[in-house]
Image (spheres, coloured by chain):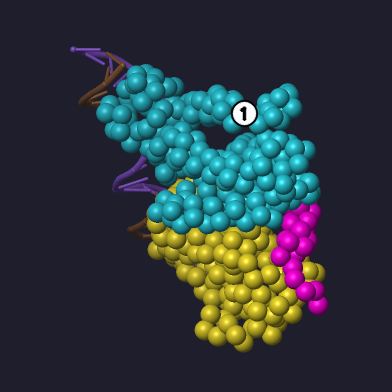
Chain colours: A yellow, B cyan, C purple, D brown
Amino acid sequence: MDTKHRILDEALTLFSQKGYANVYVGEIAEKVGIKAPSLYKHYRNKQAIFDAIIEEMNKRYEEQAGALNINGMNPASDASLYENISEDRLVEIGTGLFLYFLHDDYTSRFRKILTIEQFHNKEFAALYSSQYVDGPFSYQKMLFKLMAAGGSFASADTDVMTLQFYSPIYLLLTLCDREPDREAEACKLLEKHFRQFGRIYGGRQK
Amino acid sequence: MDTKHRILDEALTLFSQKGYANVYVGEIAEKVGIKAPSLYKHYRNKQAIFDAIIEEMNKRYEEQAGALNINGMNPASDASLYENISEDRLVEIGTGLFLYFLHDDYTSRFRKILTIEQFHNKEFAALYSSQYVDGPFSYQKMLFKLMAAGGSFASADTDVMTLQFYSPIYLLLTLCDREPDREAEACKLLEKHFRQFGRIYGGRQK
DNA sequence: GTCTATAAGAAGATAGAC
DNA sequence: GTCTATCTTCTTATAGAC
């Protein structure tokens, strides 16, 4: 990894731990193994480093959407995958979503930055909501609609179903961001949630 | 309100909007209507203002517990209130919990500070979890146990029930902290959640 | 591209008059 | 208790040698 990327990487880590204002340029430089002035050969100023992180994040968001098989243009194409779904598959989807968000190297650090900076301006607030509320919601809601259509799931109000399915994932995700030691506890509770959710809303099992 | 308290109040507002590091002593002083040096007659330094906020918060936490009728020493004394409970009462409890946390003047500002500062040190992380995860959990869990004992509610796994009941409140609370404009949307969704939760777990109606 | 030296400015805090 | 003036320190950023 070249110096420019290593600066971005160390800055991302530091910003995610302390927030933008508490990280000094000299601190980033030290982690990279250079002196502060050298850093200005790669980025115009401190803000430019932060902007580059945001930009990189936006780039990865596209890829992430792809990785999660979201296809906003043609959701019907994914239908076959979810029409007939078992309770185990539900646990698998939920756990996958949880562990992906929790452990993904870049995503998890960036989520912490958004958490810290969310009240600073509306852009950050909107970005946070889009990534950790509205995005997962519309994705999950789409799945439930497909599952209901396939007959393997109850066709209750999908908004509420989605809220009840995703909210525990969200709560435990933010809990583990804050206290990583509680991951095992969270996973145990989460699996119980998925099983019970499956019992409540699950229709004909395949 | 005397100057000392007004300093605390303005500092609380500013810290909750920008975080500790982004608020300057002169800024707090300006809001109060004095010059920065005058502020040092009331508090030893900037950190002392922050510490006073934490202390005040701890004091209010006790009162809050009282307001919510938590009686850890003798939970049975509250039993009569919850033994026979209707779906409407459930909505009332949930909405009350949500609106109390969302709008309480001091609580809501302090929650934002905790949100911003939660990754700074373990004390803040523990405080956040205690106030917005473990506290509400144990309170709500106690209620469900009483309700199950009273026969008005299913006696399912109370941990999962509590998670499924409270997580949507938590998610929508953090959403409204971030985007206050979405409060109406959140309340609508929340009521649907409570009704559906009541249908799922509600036993004999009274 | 990295360094040392240093400028420029911001922010916390103190001194001492009123 | 509040003010103006000032000190000190910290932090960003630049200049210019190598």
Report x, y in % for residue B26. Answer: 33, 34
The residue nearer to you, when weighing A162 against A67, is A162
Report x, y in % for residue B87. Answer: 62, 47
Mark 1 nearby-residue class (10 Å; few <14, some 14–19, many ≥20): few
Instruction: Tell me which residue sits at (81%, 77%) in the image.
Output: A206
Confirm whether the magenta stretch covers residue A183.
yes
Residue position for label 1: B69
Report x, y in % for residue B63. Answer: 56, 25
Instruction: Tell me which residue sits at (39%, 30%) in the image.
Output: B9
Q: Secondary structure at mark 1?
A: loop
Work out which residue is located at the far front of the displayed protein and give it: B206
The count of marks equals 1
Report x, y in % for residue A139. Answer: 59, 71
Circle 1 chain: B
Residue type at mark 1? Asn
Instruction: Tell me which residue sits at (29%, 33%) in the image.
Output: B30
Please tell me whether residue C5 is drawn above or below residue B75 in the rendered image.
below
